[in-house]
Amino acid sequence: GCHILADLRALPRAGLQRRSAPELLQALDAAYGLAPELHRWVEPPHQFSRRIELTDYVEHTDAVLAVARRLAEQLGGWLSARQLAVRRVVLSMEHERGRHARPPTELELALAQPVWQAPQILHLLREKLARFTLEAPVIAVALLAPDTVEQPAASTTLFPEPGGTPADHARLLDLLVARLGRDQVRHAHPVPDHRPEAANAWGDALSPPQRPAPLPALLDRPFWLLDPPLPLKLSGHRPQYGGQALRLMRGPERIESGWWDPALTVRDYFVAEDAAAARYWIYRERDDEHARWFLHGLYA
């Protein structure tokens, strides 16, 4: 076998070419300076940082917004010239230096989708500053865009969408986050848990959505879940709701999960129907000698 490059180079070139990929000979020739070698240069990520030092102390956010407008316009031009967009913008307000120095105050804008238009950035900054109180005078304002991405290609549809475009939804989400705060705007996302009450959780609305796992084609779930489930009375071994006996239409579907935490679930689920053809999702607990029935979901 070959242990060093000299051993490989000593082999007949024609035979080596037949037994190996063309990239091997190309790399070997480049190592000895017999072929040009193309280098992929490391390019640092594009980052925007502009700072404006004020001529006097500023104690109101209206004056800060006027400076932020100039910075947002510079950011918009910088992004357009490079065909870039941002998903996060930081407005930094510097305070007095010296013996009474304090760290800069930062306001972060996290965006649902990449943005590059200055008016949209300024609109969100205005909403953010309108609900903010300065704790100390400001002597300088800086706008930072540490994370940039390629500007998404514009796409249009032949017919207008009645519910709005994804860009419209993203702008609304950004506006709500700017007004209410990131902790107040949440969205539901699936959790890999068979227990219905634990199959969803609330997460950050601006985080990239997780790709949900494919669902079975015949999975029958109600639109509404009751929290907590409603105990049902029995009449002739049949569960009752609203004074009417329920007729079991489908089931049982056995769900047994949660052995690793205190909320162990051992249930048989059924789709039930009353005399008015309204359907309910009920279950019977299997961890008790006496069967107990509960209403857990309502079908729309």
Image: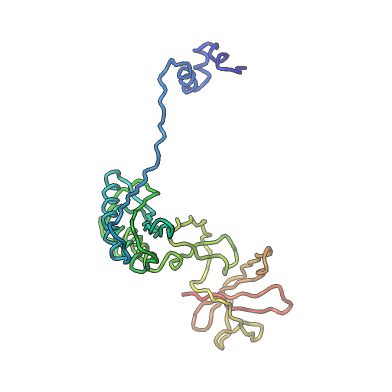
Farthest bottom residue in view: 243
The answer to whether one can see residue 90 in this image is yes
Q: Looking at the picture, how far across and down is residue 277, in whole percent?
A: 49, 80
Query: In the rendered view, does 208 fall on the left or right side of 82?
Result: right
Q: Nearer the viewer, residue 176 or 232?
A: 176
Hey, which quadrant is residue 250 in on the image?
bottom right
Name the image quarter holding residue 295: bottom right
Q: In the picture provided, is 162 more to the left or to the right than 252?
A: left
> Is residue 250 shown above or below 88?
below
Q: Position of residue 292 (x, y in %)?
A: 66, 79
Residue depicted at 37% across the width and 48% down the height: 148
The percent position of residue 165, horizontal first and vertical second, equals: 32, 60
Q: Nearer the viewer, residue 52 or 275?
A: 52
Q: Residue furthest front?
A: 99
Residue 264 as seen in the image, left or right of residue 298: right
Which quadrant holds the N terminus? top right
Tell me the residue at 44%/68% (across/down).
184
Residue drawn at (34%, 54%), measured in percent from left and top? 142
* Total count of labels: 0
Q: Nearer the viewer, residue 59 or 293?
A: 59
Q: Is residue 144 above or below residue 290?
A: above
Q: Position of residue 266 (x, y in %)?
A: 67, 69
Specify the color scheme.
rainbow
Q: Is residue 207 left or right of residue 251?
A: left
Q: Residue furthest right?
A: 289
- In this orientation, which residue lies closer to the viewer: 79 or 198? 79
Tell me the quarter of the picture where residue 169 sits. bottom left
Q: Is residue 163 visible?
A: no
